[in-house]
Image: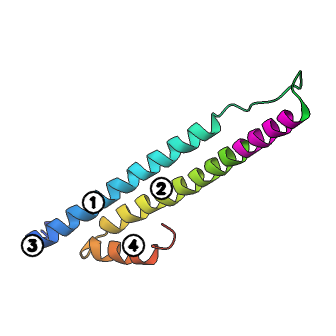
Amino acid sequence: GEPEQETHSPNERKRFDAAKMQVSVYDNYTICSAMLGGFCCSSISTSHNGGPIDDALSRYFDLVTSSHQFVIRLSALLSVYAFVVFMLCTMYARAALARQGGPGWVVYDGFLQLTVAAR
């Protein structure tokens, strides 16, 4: 037999196109978070070798350097988390929209409502 032809109203088509656009935005978020992680991991570590700097300035330098390294590591960790979240959102959203046997955006809307806290 021939495959069944699905007919969609213009309103359904607009809704499906809007959902596809939102999934492409998830792709952009995934790429941006991966780039942020790359920038964080490529940060150069600065060390202080001692020298003719007095103790007060040396402690200040150490505090600033340690704070900077902490922020860089935290940013890298959070960017990896964001990368994984948006990668999985993209994958599951596309699977929901491609679902056969009914409008995929119904499954997609359910997915969005269930995962709102994670995103």
Q: Read off the residue under disc 1.
A: 20
Q: Read off the residue under disc 2.
A: 87
> Which of the 4 image quadrants contains residue 47?
top right
Mark 3 or mark 1, which is nearer the start of the sequence? 3
The reply to whether dot 1 and dot 4 touch (C-beta < 8 Å) is no
Label 4 crowd bin: few (<14), some (14–19), many (20+), radius 10 Å: some
Whether residue 28 appears in magenta in the rendering, the answer is no
Q: Dot 4: what SS?
A: helix
Q: Read off the residue under disc 4.
A: 112
Q: Is residue 26 left or right of residue 4?
A: right
Looking at the rendering, the stretch of residues picked out in magenta corresponds to 56-68
The residue at the point 79 percent across, 43 percent down is 63
Mark 3 or mark 4, which is nearer the start of the sequence? 3
Determine if residue 7 is in view.
no
- Any mark on residue 9, and which? 3
Which residue is at the far top? 52
Disc 1/disc 3 C-alpha distance (Å): 17 Å
Q: Amino acid under label 3?
A: Ser
Q: Amino acid under label 4?
A: Leu
Determine if residue 44 is in view.
yes
Q: In this view, does 119 lie above or below 65?
A: below
Mark 3 or mark 2, which is nearer the start of the sequence? 3
Disc 2/disc 1 C-alpha distance (Å): 15 Å
The reply to whether dot 2 and dot 3 touch (C-beta < 8 Å) is no
